[in-house]
């Protein structure tokens, strides 16, 4: 998978397993953990002979490990090891990360070298290799918090964020402490600070109206 080419002398009567054993030292992958492909097709029977597979002079076989391990850096900086197979998709990797860490798959943005891994493609298609480093960021959407004076405060919100986290995010810019804020969505008060943004239907483009729970006014009395 790293592009290394290993020349092998093959007898058409050799079994596929014999070929795997021939290359295991150079490839660094034990024979029993190898998958060999010919023109993109998996050669799946280790007892079948090279000649039966149409392997002849000049044939190029692609070797991939049946399983591989990658290191995944989580949003908090911690790292975990995740075992993959070449047929895994980005969604499969996210599910494995969820199973290990509890971070829900829909909240994950999975990246390799700073670029998000595309949905629907396999590990093989994406070029993910044994020993690679992957990174998980949190999925966030742009939301606008609008104050009573018409000021609009852009906020990036994780659907898993609690309402209180959004209030804390805008406290400085709005000048209203989080605990003294009321947030409204389409005129409806969002009253539970511990409820998650996704549960309130907050998504990309949502506009939340912010009002103080209490406000001070000055009343001038007649002399």
Image (spheres, rainbow, N blue to C red):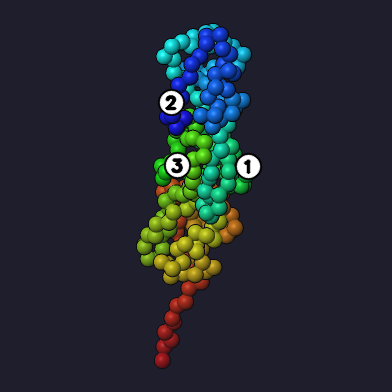
222 relative to 136 in the view: left or right = left
List the residue tagged with mark 1.
99
Q: Of circles 1 and 3, which is in front?
A: 3
Q: Name the one closer to the observer, 102 or 28.
A: 28
Q: Residue at x 44, y 18 (%)?
A: 60
Residue 54 percent across, percent down from the top left = 49, 9
| Quadrant in the picture for residue 125 | top left
Look at 63% across and 42% down and name the residue there. Answer: 99
Q: Earlier in the sequence, mark 2 or mark 1?
A: 2
34 relative to 84, above or below: above
For mark 3, what is the residue? Answer: 112
Going from the N terminus, do you reach mark 3 or mark 2 first? Answer: 2
The quadrant of the picture occupied by the C terminus is: bottom left
Of marks 3 and 2, the one in the foreground: 2
Mark 3: give few (<14), some (14-19) or many (20+) Cα within 10 Å: some
Q: CA distance from mark 3 to mark 2?
A: 25 Å
Pointer 3 and pointer 2: residues touching (CB < 8 Å)? Answer: no
Q: Secondary structure at mark 3?
A: strand
Disc 1 to disc 3, C-alpha distance: 20 Å
> How many C-alpha atoms fall within 10 Å of the one at disc 1: few (<14), some, or many (≥20)?
few
Q: CA distance from mark 2 to mark 1?
A: 36 Å
- Which is more toward the observer, 91 or 132? 132
Local packing at callout 2 (Cα closer than 10 Å; few below 14, some 14-19, many 20+) is few
Q: Nearer the viewer, residue 85 or 110?
A: 85
Local secondary structure at mark 1? helix
- Tell me which numbered mark, 1 or 3, is placed earlier along the sequence: 1
Residue that label 2 marks: 5
Residue extending farthest front: 9
SS for dot 2: loop
The image quarter containing residue 84 is top right
Any part of residue 95 in sight: no
């Amino acid at each position: 998978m790293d592009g290394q080419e290993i020349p092998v002398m093959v007898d058409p009567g050799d079994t596929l397993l014999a070929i795997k054993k021939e290359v295991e030292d150079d490839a660094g992958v034990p024979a029993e953990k190898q998958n060999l492909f010919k023109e993109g097709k998996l050669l799946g029977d280790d007892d079948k002979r090279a000649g039966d597979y149409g392997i002849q002079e000049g044939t190029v076989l692609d070797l991939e490990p049946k399983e591989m391990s990658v290191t995944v850096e989580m949003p908090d900086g911690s790292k975990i090891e995740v075992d993959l197979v070449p047929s895994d998709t980005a969604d499969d990797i996210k599910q494995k990360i969820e199973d290990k860490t509890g971070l829900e798959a829909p909240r994950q943005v999975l990246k390799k070298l700073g670029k998000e891994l595309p949905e629907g493609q396999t590990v093989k298609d994406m070029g993910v290799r044994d020993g690679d480093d992957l990174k998980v960021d949190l999925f966030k959407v742009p939301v606008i918090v609008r104050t009573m004076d018409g000021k609009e405060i852009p906020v990036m919100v994780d659907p898993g964020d609690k309402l209180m986290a959004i209030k804390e995010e805008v406290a400085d810019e709005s000048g209203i402490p989080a605990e003294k804020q009321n947030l409204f969505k389409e005129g409806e008060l969002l009253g539970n600070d511990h409820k998650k943004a996704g549960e309130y239907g907050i998504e990309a483009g949502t506009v939340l109206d912010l009002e103080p729970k209490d406000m001070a006014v000055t009343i001038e009395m007649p002399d």
